[in-house]
Image (spheres, helix red, strand yellow):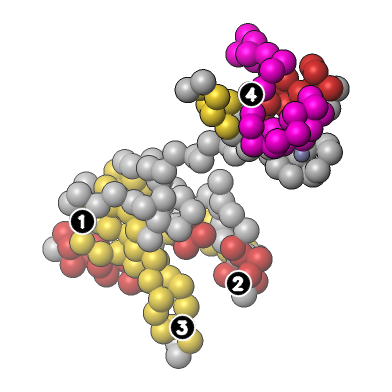
Amino acid sequence: MPNNNWLDEHWKKAHNPNYLGTFYFNDVLGAGANATITRLAQEQVFNPSSRREEQCNVAHFAEGILPLILNKTACKFLSALSGDNRPRAWVGAKIFIEVKKEKVKGKLETVLRLGDYRAGHISQAAPQPPAPPEPSRIHCEDCNNFLTPFDRDGKTYSPQQLAKSTQKLHGKDLCLDCLDRAEGRKEAGENNMEGFNDDTNS
Ligand SMILES: [Zn+2]
């Protein structure tokens, strides 16, 4: 699921795919997501900048999203939110994790920031079902135009159904006009379609 955004960013920002990072948003979560802390842990995390493992404070969430490495800014936010600077007190905290553009040491960077839980927020990317695959388009083997759906006797026929019939009749994929021509009907458009077999749904 993680995308290849890191290819377009400074190599120092190469993410660890096991933890929440800006890469995980947009594609997966939209611009932000609500999260409920279930557990805090200190974990050995590989830092691609230093190429070493570092001990980090990590928050795990009920929502099934990747765990978040807590930086100083995040820890200060959680201390203020819970009124307690001990991580133990942060369990159960409801927060909103957001992708923001911020100046870091004078440079505009994409960062994750914590904010107040947003009741009713639905992440933009998550609920979208995958788009149905577009049926592959069929070329007419005579004129090279695409076959198009057409109506006949109140029924709509797909290009696939047309091609199946013209394959049976003429051994090739034909558009409606070329089928008429092949059938000896001069007036293209007067599609009385004699010989068009309506057995294509079998
Ligand atoms: Zn054609």
- Outermost residue toward the bottom? 106
Comes first in the chain, label 4 or label 2:
2
Looking at numbered disc 3 in the image, what kind of residue is underneath it?
Leu
Comes first in the chain, label 3 or label 2:
2
Residue 165's x, y, as percent? 72, 20
Q: Is residue 196 left or right of residue 104?
A: right
Give the residue number, with chain letter if any, for mark 3.
Answer: 108
Whole-angstrom CA distance, mark 4 to mark 2, is 60 Å
Mark 1 C-beta to ligand 1 under 8 Å: no
Residue 159's x, y, as percent? 65, 31
Looking at numbered disc 4 in the image, what kind of residue is underneath it?
Asn
Secondary structure beneath dot 4 equals loop
Q: Quadrant of ligand 1?
A: top right
Secondary structure beneath dot 1 equals loop
Give the residue number, with chain letter if any, for mark 1.
Answer: 118
SS assignment for the magenta stretch, majority: loop
Comes first in the chain, label 4 or label 1:
1
What's drawn in magenta, residue-wise? 173-202
The structure residue drawn at horizontal position 46% and vertical position 50%, both measured from the top left corner, is 28
Residue 48's x, y, as percent? 62, 65
Secondary structure beneath dot 2 equals loop
Give the residue number, with chain letter if any, for mark 4.
Answer: 192
**Residue 168, relative to residue 178: is it above or below?**
above
Whole-angstrom CA distance, mark 3 to mark 2, is 12 Å
Q: Is residue 18 visible?
A: yes
**Other-residue count near label 4 (Cα within 10 Å), few / some / many at <14 / 14–19 / ≥20:** few
Of 136 and 76, nearer the camera is 136
Give the residue number, with chain letter if any, for mark 2.
Answer: 9
